[in-house]
Amino acid sequence: MEECDGGDECNADCTLPSVCGDGVSEQAEGCDDGEENGRPCRYGLEECQVCNAQCQLVAGSTSFCGDNIVDQANGEQCDGTPDCVAGCAGPGFVADQFRHYHISAVTVGPSHAVLLAGGVDNREDDVPAIELVLFRRDENTLRPISTTVLNEPLIAHGHDNGFALAGALGDSHFFFVAVRPGWERVFRFFKIVDDRLVDVGRLDFDSGFLGGHPIDDDRYLIHYRRRNSGEPIEYRLLLREGDRFRLWNILERPGPARFGQNREPSSSPGIVRIGPTTFKELRTGYLRAPAFLGSWNMNVSVGGLRTSDVRVHDTAHLTKHAWGVTNEAGVGYVIYTTYNSDRIGHLARLNGPEHTIEDVRQIEFVTSDMVTQGESRDAYFEGGYFFRSTGGQLIRVDEGTGDSTTVAEGLPHSWCSRAPSFLRSGPIGVFPVCDGTFIGLRFVDLRAP
């Protein structure tokens, strides 16, 4: 079929000449991406093909942590120098493909981490999507190595975090709970195989306000409420059998009367490991006294969950939120806040085997509701207990002296408070960050200077 016949712009074979840049790949053109012709590779990729200004596929220009070029536009503060560690010591990784962000993360085994970024994919005509970015740790640096996109809609931005919980089981499996429109929740399960992600299943779940703690390679302890924040919290075990997952066993925590109270606290509990299969719940109070910090133990066995050692501790009144970190001996520290102030934290010494929590002093600690998830021992590293506030400060409590110092700032997560407050891969702290100007992961070298 002739496109033309005669004239200065008509070829001898009666076809119109191709126009590079019109977005239509024609004749001798190898590609034509329109206004996107000549664009560089996406930051973090070590190689890719792009369409150049002459409409030919060529190797694109790259920028990534490790290319010995400081790319400040993408958050790098160093690259290639001897003291440059932890993702080029910058913001880490920017989740720049999405609007209406939901952010979370999980570390998997000794050498991998996954960023969960959800929202609207600008590349696909506003199709709701989840982007899973897999990182690999090489010594003291985390590098993005692959990306998986899921067409999974999430709740609207601003209502809550669309990722209610994320966790790992063993060195290759992980899961997250996506909150869909209508507040439907679904577990998604994945496996890391040869530095790529493999989808291994999903499981619908009808409850919210989730949190939890890993037990071992095959079991994860999950707590939740059926619907509202004032309802009793229940516990279940998430079990992994190869590449299959199932929920098993229900345990309701001791009621408020066991702690001298007449109603359930509205805030989520903290959970710390004090033994190989023993965990202590840090149970806060309520707005009306008495509301001391309480605790009780969960013992995980083949038969399920068993409660023991219900205690009320001599702490401040009106306790609101609590977080704990322990070492291998089950000893560590707790920071808790009260309804009197969200800017003052109470530092307390925790002795898991002795079942004691004793106040030490008050410290500045800006907080809002943060959900416990992940391994509580990960926040203990080289003689220091690490706590992150929603205001963005990373605080280290010295194991020997009990002194607290701020070792990093600029790590806010008040917009994504249901994401883990602390993750670690080797010596690198991994922090989901969301403050309106930066959405993604930041990395901090936890080794003492």
Image (cartoon, rainbow, N blue to C red):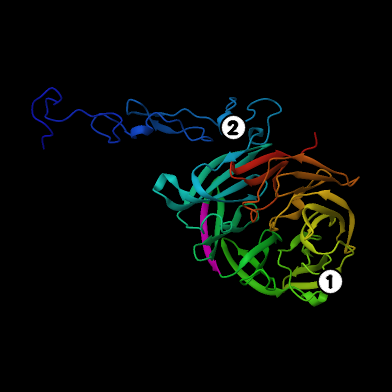
- The residue stretch that appears in magenta: 198-205
Q: Is residue 83 left or right of residue 308?
A: left
Q: Is residue 407 visible?
A: yes
| Image mark for residue 366 | none
The residue that disc 1 covers is: 310
User: Residue at 84% of width from left, 74% of height from top?
Assistant: 260
The residue that disc 2 covers is: 65
Q: Nearer the viewer, residue 374 or 94?
A: 94
Q: Nearer the viewer, residue 179 or 47?
A: 179
> Of discs 1 and 2, which sits in the foreground?
1
Label 2 Cα neighbours within 10 Å, binned few <14 / some 14-19 / many ≥20: many
Chief secondary structure of the magenta span?
strand
Please identify the quadrant where the C terminus is shown: top right
- The location of residue 293, given as percent across then percent down, is 83, 64
User: Eyeballing the image, is 410 above or below 178?
Assistant: above
Q: Is residue 219 visible?
A: no
